[in-house]
Image: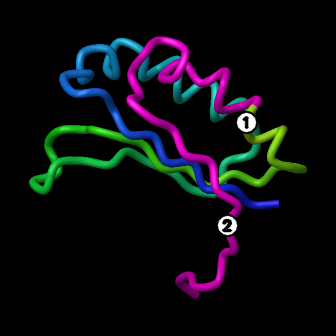
Amino acid sequence: MLFCIIGTDKKDALDKRLANRDAHLKHWGESGTVKLGGPFTSDDGEIMNGSMLVIDVEDRAAAQKLVDGDPYKVNGVFESVEVRAWKWLLKDQ
């Protein structure tokens, strides 16, 4: 089942984000669940300020477990994290 995870960074969390970025990428890379993902940015694309992932897991509990272990969440980067069931309808061919 697909879930979309939307993390919104706390104000002035960029230093924490950068300090935990490698661990965050490793966590999700090793999970084997990511279909697509990347950071939200400022309009000029220069400053990361959130994250969006689409993951494929068995159920919401599995999605939440991965979210709860994300170094960005564990280390206080995110102001909020939303986990929503998602249906992939449109995509490039």
Question: In this rendering, is residue 55 above or below 91?
Answer: above
Image quadrant where residue 32 sits: top right
Mark 1 belongs to which amino acid?
A: Gln
The residue that disc 2 covers is: 86
Place of residue 1 in the rendered image (x, y in percent of width and height, measured from the top left) = 82, 60
The answer to which of marks 1 and 2 sits earlier in the sequence is: 1
SS label for mark 2: loop
Q: Is residue 46 left or right of residue 48?
A: left
Mark 2 belongs to which amino acid?
A: Trp
Farthest right residue? Answer: 58
User: Is residue 68 part of the magenta span, yes or no?
Assistant: yes
Q: Pick whichever, 22 or 39, lies toward us.
A: 39
Q: Which residue is pictured at 35% across the width and 40% down the height?
A: 50
Q: Which residue is pictured at 86% across the width and 49% down the height?
A: 59
Place of residue 6 in the rendered image (x, y in percent of width and height, measured from the top left) = 49, 48
Q: Which mark is residue 35?
A: none
The residue that disc 1 covers is: 64
Place of residue 49 in the rendered image (x, y in percent of width and height, measured from the top left) = 27, 38
Q: How many marks?
A: 2
Q: Callout 2: 10 Å neighbours few (<14), some, many (20+)? A: some
SS label for mark 1: helix
Q: Pick whichever, 45 or 79, lies toward us.
A: 79
| Callouts 1 and 2 close, C-beta under 8 Å | no
| Highlighted range, magenta | 65-93
Q: Which residue is pictured at 70% across the width and 61% down the height?
A: 85
Q: Is residue 41 left or right of residue 92?
A: left
The alpha-carbon separation of the residues under discs 1 and 2 comes to 14 Å
